[in-house]
Image (tube, rainbow, N blue to C red):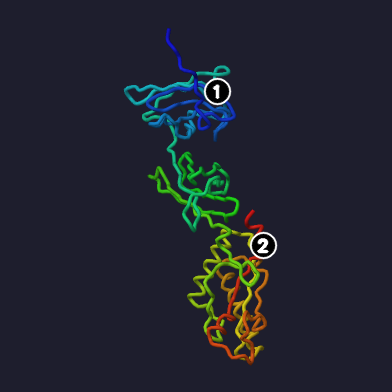
Amino acid sequence: GQIMSAPVNLGPRINSPGNEVAPYIFEGNLYFSSDIFYGLGDMDIYVSKIQTDNTFSIPVNLGDGVNSIQHDFGFIIKKNTEGYLGYFSSNREGGKGQDDIYGFKVSEKPGLKTLVIKGIVENSNTSKGIENSIIQLLDKEGKLIKKTRSDVDGKYQFEIPFRAAYSLTASTKGYGIFSNSFLIEPEAVTQTINIPLLAADDIVEEKEGKTVLKLKKLQFNRSSSVVTASIASELDKVIAITKSFPTVLLNIESHTNSKGSSATNYTLSQSRADAIRNYLVSKGVNSKIISNAKGYGETKLTNQCKDGVFCLDFLHEKNERTNIEVLNFETLKK
Protein backbone atom coordinates (compact mmCIF):
# COMPACT_ATOMS: atom_id res chain seq x y z
CA GLY A 1 0.00 0.00 0.00
CA GLN A 2 0.95 3.65 -0.25
CA ILE A 3 2.86 5.26 2.61
CA MET A 4 1.58 8.68 3.62
CA SER A 5 3.92 11.23 5.22
CA ALA A 6 2.94 12.51 8.65
CA PRO A 7 0.61 15.53 8.30
CA VAL A 8 2.38 18.87 8.90
CA ASN A 9 0.46 21.90 10.15
CA LEU A 10 0.57 24.70 7.55
CA GLY A 11 1.42 27.16 10.31
CA PRO A 12 0.09 30.49 11.58
CA ARG A 13 -0.06 32.19 8.17
CA ILE A 14 -2.82 29.79 7.04
CA ASN A 15 -4.18 28.48 10.35
CA SER A 16 -5.82 30.91 12.75
CA PRO A 17 -7.42 30.38 16.17
CA GLY A 18 -10.70 29.84 14.26
CA ASN A 19 -11.77 27.21 11.70
CA GLU A 20 -9.98 26.58 8.41
CA VAL A 21 -11.70 24.04 6.11
CA ALA A 22 -12.01 22.71 2.53
CA PRO A 23 -8.47 23.14 1.13
CA TYR A 24 -8.14 23.03 -2.66
CA ILE A 25 -5.04 23.55 -4.84
CA PHE A 26 -5.21 24.99 -8.36
CA GLU A 27 -2.42 26.49 -10.50
CA GLY A 28 -0.04 27.11 -7.59
CA ASN A 29 -2.70 28.58 -5.30
CA LEU A 30 -4.24 27.16 -2.14
CA TYR A 31 -7.95 27.96 -1.74
CA PHE A 32 -9.60 27.37 1.64
CA SER A 33 -12.33 28.74 3.90
CA SER A 34 -11.88 30.45 7.27
CA ASP A 35 -14.18 32.15 9.76
CA ILE A 36 -11.59 34.44 11.34
CA PHE A 37 -9.47 36.38 8.82
CA TYR A 38 -10.62 39.86 7.67
CA GLY A 39 -13.81 38.46 6.21
CA LEU A 40 -17.11 39.66 4.77
CA GLY A 41 -19.19 37.18 6.76
CA ASP A 42 -19.26 34.06 8.92
CA MET A 43 -17.01 31.87 6.77
CA ASP A 44 -15.25 33.20 3.69
CA ILE A 45 -13.10 31.71 0.93
CA TYR A 46 -9.46 32.79 0.72
CA VAL A 47 -6.57 32.23 -1.67
CA SER A 48 -2.89 31.93 -0.75
CA LYS A 49 -0.07 31.65 -3.28
CA ILE A 50 2.19 28.63 -2.78
CA GLN A 51 5.67 30.15 -2.98
CA THR A 52 8.82 28.50 -4.39
CA ASP A 53 10.09 27.46 -0.94
CA ASN A 54 6.70 25.83 -0.18
CA THR A 55 5.70 28.62 2.19
CA PHE A 56 2.42 30.50 1.70
CA SER A 57 1.68 34.13 0.98
CA ILE A 58 -0.72 35.83 3.38
CA PRO A 59 -4.29 34.70 2.52
CA VAL A 60 -6.46 37.14 0.58
CA ASN A 61 -10.26 37.24 0.61
CA LEU A 62 -11.88 36.37 -2.76
CA GLY A 63 -14.18 39.34 -2.31
CA ASP A 64 -17.85 40.04 -3.02
CA GLY A 65 -19.70 37.67 -5.33
CA VAL A 66 -17.99 34.52 -4.15
CA ASN A 67 -18.16 35.60 -0.50
CA SER A 68 -21.31 36.77 1.27
CA ILE A 69 -22.27 37.66 4.83
CA GLN A 70 -23.12 33.95 5.40
CA HIS A 71 -21.00 30.75 5.27
CA ASP A 72 -19.09 30.26 2.02
CA PHE A 73 -16.83 27.20 1.63
CA GLY A 74 -15.81 24.17 -0.48
CA PHE A 75 -14.44 26.23 -3.39
CA ILE A 76 -13.17 24.41 -6.52
CA ILE A 77 -12.21 25.82 -9.93
CA LYS A 78 -11.11 24.58 -13.37
CA LYS A 79 -10.18 26.04 -16.72
CA ASN A 80 -12.74 25.99 -19.56
CA THR A 81 -12.87 27.49 -23.05
CA GLU A 82 -14.10 30.92 -21.94
CA GLY A 83 -11.93 31.26 -18.85
CA TYR A 84 -12.69 29.53 -15.57
CA LEU A 85 -15.60 27.55 -14.16
CA GLY A 86 -15.96 27.26 -10.39
CA TYR A 87 -18.22 25.85 -7.69
CA PHE A 88 -18.62 26.44 -3.96
CA SER A 89 -21.16 25.90 -1.21
CA SER A 90 -23.02 28.63 0.66
CA ASN A 91 -26.01 29.07 2.98
CA ARG A 92 -26.64 32.58 1.64
CA GLU A 93 -30.12 34.09 1.26
CA GLY A 94 -32.17 32.83 -1.71
CA GLY A 95 -30.99 29.20 -1.60
CA LYS A 96 -33.15 26.06 -1.77
CA GLY A 97 -32.19 24.73 1.65
CA GLN A 98 -29.44 25.17 4.20
CA ASP A 99 -26.12 24.78 2.31
CA ASP A 100 -26.50 24.95 -1.47
CA ILE A 101 -23.95 24.51 -4.27
CA TYR A 102 -23.36 27.54 -6.53
CA GLY A 103 -21.54 27.64 -9.87
CA PHE A 104 -19.89 30.64 -11.53
CA LYS A 105 -17.96 31.55 -14.65
CA VAL A 106 -15.14 34.11 -14.70
CA SER A 107 -12.68 35.28 -17.37
CA GLU A 108 -9.77 35.38 -14.89
CA LYS A 109 -9.02 33.67 -11.60
CA PRO A 110 -10.93 35.31 -8.75
CA GLY A 111 -9.02 37.05 -5.98
CA LEU A 112 -8.58 40.61 -4.89
CA LYS A 113 -5.44 42.42 -6.02
CA THR A 114 -3.00 42.36 -3.13
CA LEU A 115 -0.57 44.91 -1.80
CA VAL A 116 2.61 43.89 0.01
CA ILE A 117 3.96 46.49 2.47
CA LYS A 118 7.33 45.63 3.91
CA GLY A 119 10.53 47.14 5.24
CA ILE A 120 12.80 47.41 8.25
CA VAL A 121 12.20 49.15 11.57
CA GLU A 122 15.58 50.73 12.30
CA ASN A 123 17.39 52.95 14.77
CA SER A 124 17.44 56.36 13.05
CA ASN A 125 20.96 57.00 14.36
CA THR A 126 22.72 53.68 13.65
CA SER A 127 20.37 52.19 10.96
CA LYS A 128 20.42 48.91 12.90
CA GLY A 129 17.18 46.88 12.78
CA ILE A 130 14.97 46.95 15.89
CA GLU A 131 13.33 43.64 16.78
CA ASN A 132 9.93 43.17 18.40
CA SER A 133 8.67 46.58 17.38
CA ILE A 134 4.87 46.83 17.10
CA ILE A 135 3.81 48.01 13.63
CA GLN A 136 0.16 48.89 12.95
CA LEU A 137 -1.42 49.29 9.54
CA LEU A 138 -4.43 51.63 9.58
CA ASP A 139 -6.96 52.62 6.94
CA LYS A 140 -7.40 56.27 5.97
CA GLU A 141 -10.02 56.71 8.71
CA GLY A 142 -7.45 55.53 11.27
CA LYS A 143 -9.08 52.12 11.85
CA LEU A 144 -6.73 49.20 12.48
CA ILE A 145 -6.42 46.79 9.53
CA LYS A 146 -3.54 44.63 10.77
CA LYS A 147 -0.84 44.56 13.40
CA THR A 148 2.52 42.78 13.40
CA ARG A 149 5.92 42.74 15.12
CA SER A 150 9.35 43.15 13.54
CA ASP A 151 11.62 40.09 13.49
CA VAL A 152 15.18 39.81 14.90
CA ASP A 153 16.54 41.85 11.97
CA GLY A 154 13.85 44.51 12.33
CA LYS A 155 11.98 43.29 9.22
CA TYR A 156 8.19 43.41 8.94
CA GLN A 157 5.67 42.57 6.22
CA PHE A 158 1.95 43.02 5.59
CA GLU A 159 -0.03 41.56 2.72
CA ILE A 160 -3.53 43.01 2.30
CA PRO A 161 -6.22 43.48 -0.34
CA PHE A 162 -5.14 46.48 -2.45
CA ARG A 163 -6.02 49.94 -1.14
CA ALA A 164 -4.97 53.36 -2.43
CA ALA A 165 -4.22 54.95 0.95
CA TYR A 166 -3.17 53.78 4.39
CA SER A 167 -1.01 54.82 7.32
CA LEU A 168 1.62 53.08 9.44
CA THR A 169 2.54 53.54 13.09
CA ALA A 170 5.42 51.88 14.92
CA SER A 171 6.58 51.90 18.52
CA THR A 172 9.13 50.14 20.73
CA LYS A 173 10.10 50.56 24.38
CA GLY A 174 12.92 53.10 24.69
CA TYR A 175 12.14 54.71 21.31
CA GLY A 176 9.88 57.43 19.98
CA ILE A 177 6.87 56.67 17.82
CA PHE A 178 6.62 56.70 14.02
CA SER A 179 3.41 57.71 12.28
CA ASN A 180 2.95 58.46 8.59
CA SER A 181 0.35 58.25 5.82
CA PHE A 182 0.94 56.88 2.33
CA LEU A 183 -0.79 57.07 -1.06
CA ILE A 184 -0.30 54.19 -3.51
CA GLU A 185 -0.10 54.21 -7.29
CA PRO A 186 -2.81 51.92 -8.77
CA GLU A 187 -0.23 49.70 -10.50
CA ALA A 188 1.85 49.16 -7.32
CA VAL A 189 2.08 45.65 -5.90
CA THR A 190 4.86 46.16 -3.34
CA GLN A 191 5.71 49.14 -1.14
CA THR A 192 9.01 49.14 0.74
CA ILE A 193 8.83 51.44 3.73
CA ASN A 194 11.72 51.57 6.18
CA ILE A 195 10.65 52.96 9.54
CA PRO A 196 13.25 55.03 11.45
CA LEU A 197 12.72 55.23 15.22
CA LEU A 198 14.50 57.74 17.44
CA ALA A 199 16.12 56.22 20.56
CA ALA A 200 15.34 58.17 23.74
CA ASP A 201 18.99 57.87 24.83
CA ASP A 202 20.17 59.50 21.60
CA ILE A 203 18.25 62.75 22.05
CA VAL A 204 19.69 63.90 25.42
CA GLU A 205 22.90 64.66 27.29
CA GLU A 206 23.71 65.75 30.83
CA LYS A 207 24.63 69.40 31.28
CA GLU A 208 24.87 71.38 34.51
CA GLY A 209 23.23 68.51 36.39
CA LYS A 210 20.22 68.49 34.06
CA THR A 211 19.01 66.22 31.24
CA VAL A 212 18.92 68.48 28.17
CA LEU A 213 18.29 67.93 24.45
CA LYS A 214 21.51 67.15 22.57
CA LEU A 215 21.87 70.08 20.16
CA LYS A 216 24.67 72.16 18.68
CA LYS A 217 25.09 75.44 20.55
CA LEU A 218 22.21 77.86 19.87
CA GLN A 219 24.46 80.78 18.89
CA PHE A 220 22.59 84.12 18.94
CA ASN A 221 24.23 87.20 17.44
CA ARG A 222 25.61 89.66 19.97
CA SER A 223 22.88 91.47 21.95
CA SER A 224 20.28 89.89 19.65
CA SER A 225 17.42 87.47 20.28
CA VAL A 226 16.65 86.84 16.60
CA VAL A 227 16.44 83.14 15.66
CA THR A 228 19.12 82.80 12.96
CA ALA A 229 19.14 80.13 10.23
CA SER A 230 21.67 78.03 12.16
CA ILE A 231 19.56 78.19 15.36
CA ALA A 232 16.43 77.35 13.32
CA SER A 233 18.08 74.20 11.88
CA GLU A 234 18.79 72.98 15.45
CA LEU A 235 15.25 73.84 16.57
CA ASP A 236 13.91 71.81 13.64
CA LYS A 237 15.55 68.80 15.34
CA VAL A 238 13.55 69.70 18.46
CA ILE A 239 10.35 69.72 16.37
CA ALA A 240 11.17 66.21 15.05
CA ILE A 241 11.79 65.04 18.64
CA THR A 242 8.38 66.36 19.78
CA LYS A 243 6.70 64.45 16.95
CA SER A 244 8.50 61.28 17.96
CA PHE A 245 7.87 61.84 21.69
CA PRO A 246 4.52 63.69 21.87
CA THR A 247 4.46 63.45 25.71
CA VAL A 248 7.86 65.13 26.18
CA LEU A 249 7.91 68.08 28.63
CA LEU A 250 10.44 70.82 27.89
CA ASN A 251 11.89 73.71 29.83
CA ILE A 252 13.81 76.42 27.95
CA GLU A 253 16.57 78.19 29.89
CA SER A 254 18.69 80.99 28.46
CA HIS A 255 21.82 82.54 30.01
CA THR A 256 24.11 85.43 29.07
CA ASN A 257 27.66 86.29 30.05
CA SER A 258 28.45 89.04 32.56
CA LYS A 259 29.34 91.75 30.01
CA GLY A 260 26.97 94.72 30.11
CA SER A 261 24.47 95.51 32.86
CA SER A 262 22.73 92.68 34.68
CA ALA A 263 19.29 94.21 33.91
CA THR A 264 20.04 94.32 30.16
CA ASN A 265 21.34 90.75 30.30
CA TYR A 266 18.25 89.52 32.11
CA THR A 267 15.98 91.09 29.46
CA LEU A 268 18.13 89.73 26.63
CA SER A 269 18.10 86.17 28.01
CA GLN A 270 14.33 86.30 28.55
CA SER A 271 13.68 87.49 25.00
CA ARG A 272 15.94 84.68 23.67
CA ALA A 273 14.02 82.04 25.64
CA ASP A 274 10.75 83.54 24.35
CA ALA A 275 12.07 83.62 20.76
CA ILE A 276 12.86 79.90 20.93
CA ARG A 277 9.45 79.05 22.36
CA ASN A 278 7.71 81.23 19.76
CA TYR A 279 9.64 79.59 16.92
CA LEU A 280 8.72 76.08 18.10
CA VAL A 281 5.04 76.96 18.60
CA SER A 282 4.89 78.73 15.20
CA LYS A 283 6.04 75.45 13.62
CA GLY A 284 3.25 73.44 15.22
CA VAL A 285 4.75 72.33 18.55
CA ASN A 286 2.01 72.14 21.19
CA SER A 287 2.64 75.04 23.62
CA LYS A 288 1.49 72.79 26.51
CA ILE A 289 4.66 70.69 26.28
CA ILE A 290 6.84 73.76 26.94
CA SER A 291 6.38 74.15 30.67
CA ASN A 292 8.54 77.26 30.93
CA ALA A 293 10.78 79.59 28.92
CA LYS A 294 12.96 81.55 31.31
CA GLY A 295 15.93 83.89 31.04
CA TYR A 296 18.47 83.95 33.87
CA GLY A 297 20.73 86.75 32.59
CA GLU A 298 24.16 86.46 34.21
CA THR A 299 22.94 84.85 37.47
CA LYS A 300 24.11 81.29 36.65
CA LEU A 301 27.63 81.60 35.29
CA THR A 302 29.52 78.34 34.70
CA ASN A 303 32.95 79.81 35.50
CA GLN A 304 34.60 82.67 37.40
CA CYS A 305 33.95 85.34 34.72
CA LYS A 306 31.68 87.57 36.80
CA ASP A 307 31.60 91.39 36.83
CA GLY A 308 35.03 92.84 37.68
CA VAL A 309 36.97 89.69 36.76
CA PHE A 310 39.16 89.85 33.65
CA CYS A 311 38.34 86.99 31.30
CA LEU A 312 39.26 86.11 27.74
CA ASP A 313 36.37 86.18 25.26
CA PHE A 314 36.24 82.39 24.87
CA LEU A 315 35.60 82.03 28.62
CA HIS A 316 32.82 84.68 28.53
CA GLU A 317 31.47 82.76 25.53
CA LYS A 318 30.98 79.62 27.66
CA ASN A 319 28.48 81.45 29.85
CA GLU A 320 26.37 82.51 26.88
CA ARG A 321 24.14 79.44 26.40
CA THR A 322 20.57 78.26 25.96
CA ASN A 323 19.56 74.76 27.05
CA ILE A 324 16.31 72.91 26.49
CA GLU A 325 15.75 70.65 29.48
CA VAL A 326 13.70 67.42 29.29
CA LEU A 327 11.65 67.26 32.50
CA ASN A 328 10.22 63.74 32.11
CA PHE A 329 13.04 61.77 30.46
CA GLU A 330 12.55 58.59 32.52
CA THR A 331 8.90 58.25 31.45
CA LEU A 332 9.88 58.67 27.76
CA LYS A 333 12.01 55.53 28.00
CA LYS A 334 9.16 53.33 29.20
Q: Please name which of the two marks, 2 or 1, marks the residue nearer to the observer.
A: 2
Circle 2: element type: loop
Where in the figure is residue 225, as x and y percent of width and height? 56, 81
Q: In this view, does 321 lie above or below 157?
A: below
Q: What residue type is labelled 1?
A: Gly
Where in the figure is residue 44, as x and y percent of width and height? 53, 28
Residue placed most toward the observer, 50 or 174 = 174
Where in the figure is residue 155, as x and y percent of width and height? 48, 45
Q: Which residue lies furthest to the top in this view?
A: 1
Give the class, few, some or many, for how many residues have Cα within 10 Å of label 1's Cα (few <14, many ≥20).
Answer: few
Q: In this view, does 309 lie above or below 271?
A: below
Residue placed most toward the observer, 29 or 313 = 313
Where in the figure is residue 106, as x and y percent of width and height? 39, 28
- The residue that appears at 53% across and 74% down in the rendered structure is 217
**Looking at the figure, which quarter contains the N terminus?**
top left
Query: Which residue is label 1 attached to?
Result: 94
Residue placed most toward the observer, 146 or 176 = 176
Query: Which residue is label 2 attached to?
Result: 328
| Mark found first going from the N terminus, 2 or 1 | 1
- The residue that appears at 49% across and 33% down in the rendered structure is 61
Q: Which residue lies furthest to the left in this view?
A: 81
Compared across the picture, whether 56 is left or right of 333 comes to left
Callout 2 touching callout 1 (CB < 8 Å): no
Task: Measure the C-alpha gap from mark 2 to mark 1.
Answer: 62 Å
- The residue that appears at 51% across and 32% down in the rendered structure is 13
Residue placed most toward the observer, 89 or 210 = 210
Of the numbered discs in the image, which one, if any, rests on residue 42? none
Q: What residue type is labelled 2?
A: Asn
